[in-house]
């Protein structure tokens, strides 16, 4: 699916997604990554929800979002609540959804200048 949005100068936007990739500013990414309007971390460690650990979530928390969109791939899969508890204790909301839904939601929140981070599993 191709998404067409106006880009704000310098801001990272999701411009497309499909089987095995997500495009950020027209550049396809095929590995898990973290995205905020100002930051792209394309070498995020975990490659599946099963690999997710506290250190990986702390990498997201260091970006100071108020909400994290956790895109879990084609299927919505919830990580253990014990992994999410530290972020919730810091006042960071976490929404778990498919990666496609997270892509769409990220663009809306980023356009509204919300302090959002997307942590996306591509496959």
Image (spheres, rainbow, N blue to C red):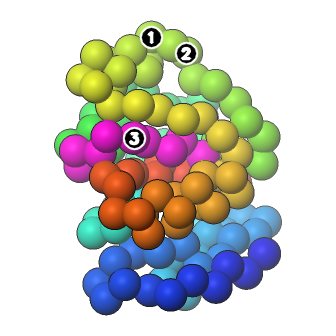
Residue 30 occupies which quadrant of the picture? bottom right
Q: Earlier in the sequence, mark 1 or mark 3?
A: 3
Is 11 located above or below residue 49 in the figure? below
Quadrant location, the C terminus: bottom right
On the image, the x and y values in percent for residue 24 come to 50, 76
Mark 3 element type = strand
Residue sitting at 54 percent across and 52 percent down? 120
According to the picture, the residue beneath numbered tag 2 turns out to be: 80
- Asked whether, in this view, residue 43 is left or right of residue 78, the answer is left
Residue 93 visible (yes or no):
yes
Q: Position of residue 62 (x, y in %)?
A: 21, 43
Q: Where residue 9 sits: x, y (%)?
A: 31, 88
Identify the residue shown where x is 60% and y is 46%: 71
Q: Which residue is mark 3?
A: 67
Q: Is residue 25 left or right of residue 92?
A: right
Residue that carries the numbered disc 1 in the rendered image: 82
């Amino acid at each position: 699916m191709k998404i067409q949005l106006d880009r704000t100068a310098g801001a990272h936007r999701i411009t497309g997604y499909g089987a095995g990739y997500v495009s950020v500013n027209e550049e396809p990414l095929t590995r898990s990554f973290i995205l905020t309007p100002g930051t792209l971390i394309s070498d995020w460690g975990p490659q599946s929800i099963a690999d997710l650990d506290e250190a990986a979530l702390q990498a997201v928390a260091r970006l100071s979002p108020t909400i994290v969109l956790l895109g879990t791939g084609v299927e919505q899969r919830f990580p253990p609540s014990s992994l999410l508890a530290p972020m919730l204790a810091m006042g960071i909301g976490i929404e778990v959804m498919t990666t496609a839904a997270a892509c769409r939601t990220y663009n809306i929140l980023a356009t509204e200048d919300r302090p959002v981070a997307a942590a996306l599993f591509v496959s």
